[in-house]
Amino acid sequence: MTPACGERPKLLVVANRLPVSAKRTGENSWFLEMSPGGLVSGVTAQFDTKWVGWPGVDVYDEVGKNALSKALAEMKCIPVFLEEVFDQYYNGYCNGILWPILHHMGLPQDDHHDTNKTSQTQYDAYKKANRLFLDVIIDNYEEGDIVWCHDYHLMFLPQYLKEYNSKIKVGWFLHSPFPSSEVYKTLPSRSELLRSVLTADLLGFHTYDFARHFVSTCTRILGVEGTHEGIVDQGRVTRVAVFPIGIDPDRFIRTCKLPEVIQQMNELKERFSGKKVILGVDRLDMIKGIPQKYLGFEKFLEENPNWRHKVVLVQIAVPTRNGVPEYQKVKTQVHGLVGRINGRFGSVSSLPIHHLDCSVNFNYLCALYAIADVMLVTSLRDGMNLVSYEFVACQEAEKGVLVLSEFAGAGQSLGAGALLSKNRLIILGFFGTLTEPMHRRTKEMDLKLNPEVKGTLEALCNDPKTTVVVLSRTGRNILDQIF
Ligand code: G6P
């Protein structure tokens, strides 16, 4: 049925992972928690939204599956059970092959990947997984619904949906970067995947560069035409556009005012009193540049003995994709570096790096963001990196420094250009993609910058209460410029 006049259109948001964490508490009972994020808060207000995705757990028995489906339905979530293909699809093709290519890293040189047989099995599992998503959508689709597919896990879904019913409105959004055609070309199934996403009506990317790479890749590999609207192939237009994701800054600002969080902030300040706190919050992924961050910090301590024992780097390294060999390697590498650096520069009472292999709860995360003097984002490549926004939102009292890799999508949203002044790189720009409260905050910065840029820059550099956004290639050689 098409929505009646005045009714909100129905949107099926399809992503590999549902925005819910599920824990089994009994044979037919589950504990579910919604994980609010930019996407969740952004779309639910405008549409009657349902979510379709993998529930994040393997469930092999029908009793468990039925109970979970029932509990999820109350949260407008519909599960896709992927047990039969999960390892080859998720650890294999998605995160062992597509993820490194999309992040400009090429195919991993690993015995696990270099045989045709292995990659063929993974590719087949990927297609099968996309078909399992299709089956669930077909069971839940009603005429007039919009289907919005997300990310590199679901590149065959647009084609499968259009083959099922060419009238379904389909969007596809990529949350990761899209690399230059020279890198993308290394993927054996390059043409099939492109042809499939081009069957969608609208394709979205975080940044202009990613969209431009995508369009030129399509023109080079498929010979189609790229126009200002997107891609034209035999008269059919697929629109390509840029929609940078943001956060809900109010949620962070509100949380920082909770008594419990203020108490946590005070405890943290007490714990690190007399020291500058540098914070890192990343999934333990090779794209996040955590080894490079540690090497940069080691060099800083090596070259600035006066800073030893006066600065601490707190790194929350959230475990992720443990089934992929590349992730296991980076974890071992990072642990080795932490041991070496703490061994070299630590003492019985003070360690330079506090590395935690875990996630922290939301309130504690906000307390950490709020008390940090520096946030260090050293991504080698990154789709957007919302951690950068979250830090700025929480910096109400401290006004610290965000060191942001130019290879994260946020580097394009957060600034229009960079200037070097008084040994600091300062971004002049605006938070074009952020919602109202963040705009207000940055407008204050802009006002300060507009009248007399040069003089104001000097004032900014000397004012410890200003949030300064610093752009850097990696963390290397830059920490000494901040303090
Ligand atoms: C990136 C991807 C997302 C993914 C997230 C967490 O941001 O673009 O699609 O959900 O990482 O990774 P995971 O593999 O744990 O879902």
Image: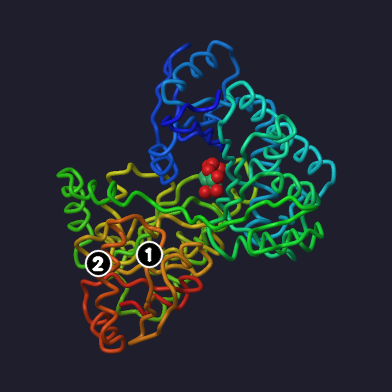
Residue 410 versus residue 451: which sits nearer the camera? Answer: 451
Q: Give the amino acid at mark 1.
A: Phe
Residue 11 visible to the viewer? yes
**Residue occupying the point 61% across, 52% down:** 329
Vertical arrangement, residue 3 with respect to residue 392, above or below: above
Of badges 1 and 2, the one in the foreground is 1
The residue tagged 2 is 399
Closer to us: 3 or 300: 3
- Spot occupied by residue 85 in the image (x, y as percentages of width and height): 69, 30
Q: Residues within 10 Å of mark 2 (few under 14, many from 20)?
A: many
Q: Position of residue 422 (x, y in %)?
A: 33, 87
For residue 377, which quarter of the picture?
A: bottom left
**Residue at the image position 29 percent from the left and 81 percent from the top:** 450
**Badge 1 local density, few (<14 within 10 Å), some, or many (20+)?**
many
Element marked by disc 1: loop
In the rendered image, residue 265, in percent from the top left (x then y), is placed at 20, 53
Under circle 2, the secondary element is: loop
Q: Is residue 320 visible?
A: no
Q: Amino acid at mark 2?
A: Lys
Image: 314 above or below 33:
below
The residue under label 1 is 431
86 relative to 434 in the view: left or right: right
Q: Which quadrant of the render holds ligand 1? A: top right
Answer with the quarter of the image where residue 33 lies.
Answer: top left
Quarter of the picture containing the N terminus is top right
**Cα–Cα gap, marks 1 and 2:** 16 Å
Q: Residue at x 45, y 78 (%)?
A: 477
Give the tally of numbered discs.
2
Mark found first going from the N terminus, 1 or 2: 2
